[in-house]
Image (tube, rainbow, N blue to C red):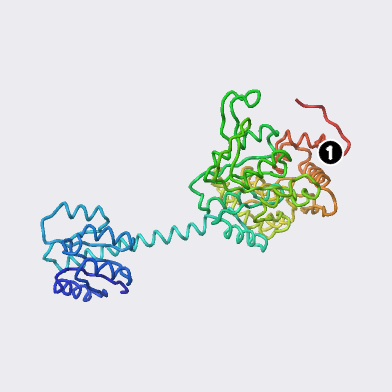
Amino acid sequence: MDVRILVIDDQESHAKATAESLERAGYKCVTATGAREGLRVLENDQVDVVVTDLVMPDMDGVAFVKQAKRTTPDVEVVVMTAYDNEDAVIDAMKAGAADWMKKPLDIRRVRIVVEKALEKQRLARENVDLHRQLDERYSYAEILGNTPGMMRVLDTVKQVAGTNATVLIQGETGTGKELIAQAIHRNSPRRAHRLLPVNCAALPEGILESELFGHEKGAFTGAIAQRRGKFEFAHRGTLFLDEVSDMPYATQAKLLRAVELGEIARVGSDEPIKVDVRILAAANRDLGLMVKEGKFREDLYYRLRVVMIQLPPLRERLADVPILVDHYLHEFSGKHRKRISGITREALEMLMRYSWPGNVRELRGCIETMIVLSRAEKLDVADIPSYAVGETGDRTPVPALSGISIEQAEKALIKKTLEDVKGNREKAAQILGIGERTLYRKLKLYGLSAAGKDGAREPDEE
């Protein structure tokens, strides 16, 4: 039994007698004849349990318990006393003592009390170890995948999470950029504070500035009161700037100042306000290319790109589809109270042949649909939505888009997605990760109909 016990008693004979009785029970013991000597042993030796006298000439026993628990938090302390001093015993227990015994000692009780203290310590250590394992296992639980690309992503996330570095997360729509931001924040020193997301593409320039930096009363029409922005609310926490590539050029200059100097000014005020905020930014377009095209500030780009995380599209990591499917099977069968035991090999292989233009978000929605509509306990080919299965059970992969502009690539993606969902605009918007109104504006911009055909026009809405 590899347990070490420290026995402290100012009467050396009593200390040795107690130690000998515990050694006969199989414990290793060391003795000390004073509290200060005992503290030195604790500092220099591995000790599991301390059995100590409560009244000692060189230090009060309660003070010893406090000091012992402060320097060695997981050590269990059992106090002994020959006096009827109930208040001192209570104080020692409040200070962290595990138990107490009355002198003269009953050797059988000594062994029972020590065994109890060791069991308490064992459970506490197991609990700490379990929490450590759970933290390691589940703090990155949303980052699913075993392919080399995703393993590199996970490794970078683990390295950067414990720092305050600004991170730029790039990837196509639906690849899970916000999940990466959440994983970084949850494992950062700022995890006790807020993670505030801001969708930079969803708000017009003036409103976006107010949302980020706040505004003063009367700063613009409708500003009837002073308002704090996301930077102030995220103080000591993390701000997640989603779709930062769509941020207006003028707003980028103000963001640069906030990132560089750690200060902002509300709209309508020149008074600087200091903020302590970590910035995580995400973009579904190549910011480096946008810099070359003059559409994004170069200085801001380099400030945001202290660490770059590039998320691969799902079509480049199809080997991860089984892991993702299994995860979503458990998630949605529980959510919708459906008894789903798994998925057939044929159905899984078919899902792995699809190109998934909407990436992980599209796969997630697909599995939820399959579970909701399934009549059997095992998902099969017949449960796969029509947009993910061609007549032959195969899909033509998305053509390579290198060598064309972002606008042309976006048009091609929207057109392909609309064709896949047979013109269902709601489904297409869900797969693309944008609102229906945004999709409608892009249809008009690119001259597409809801079916994805070129040159078609639809009646104006709103």
Task: Say whether residue 131 is left or right of residue 156.
Answer: left
Quadrant in the picture for the C terminus: top right
Name the spot of residue 348 as percent of width and height, x first.
68, 56
Q: How many numbered dots are placed on residues in this image?
A: 1
Task: Say whether residue 81 is left or right of residue 372.
Answer: left
Residue sitting at x 85%, y 36%: 447
Q: Kindly identify which residue carries mark 1.
A: 446
Quadrant in the picture for the N terminus: bottom left
Residue 227 vs residue 392, the one in the foreground:
227
Indicate whether 347 appears above or below 34: above
Residue 300 vs residue 238, the one in the foreground:
300
Task: Say whether residue 336 is left or right of residue 345.
Answer: left
Residue 36 vs residue 149, the one in the foreground:
36
Name the spot of residue 114 as percent of width and height, x first.
24, 65
Residue 93 vs residue 144, the one in the foreground:
93
Q: Quadrant of residue 450?
A: top right
Indicate whether 459 appears above or below 30: above
Name the spot of residue 64 as percent of width and height, x first.
24, 61
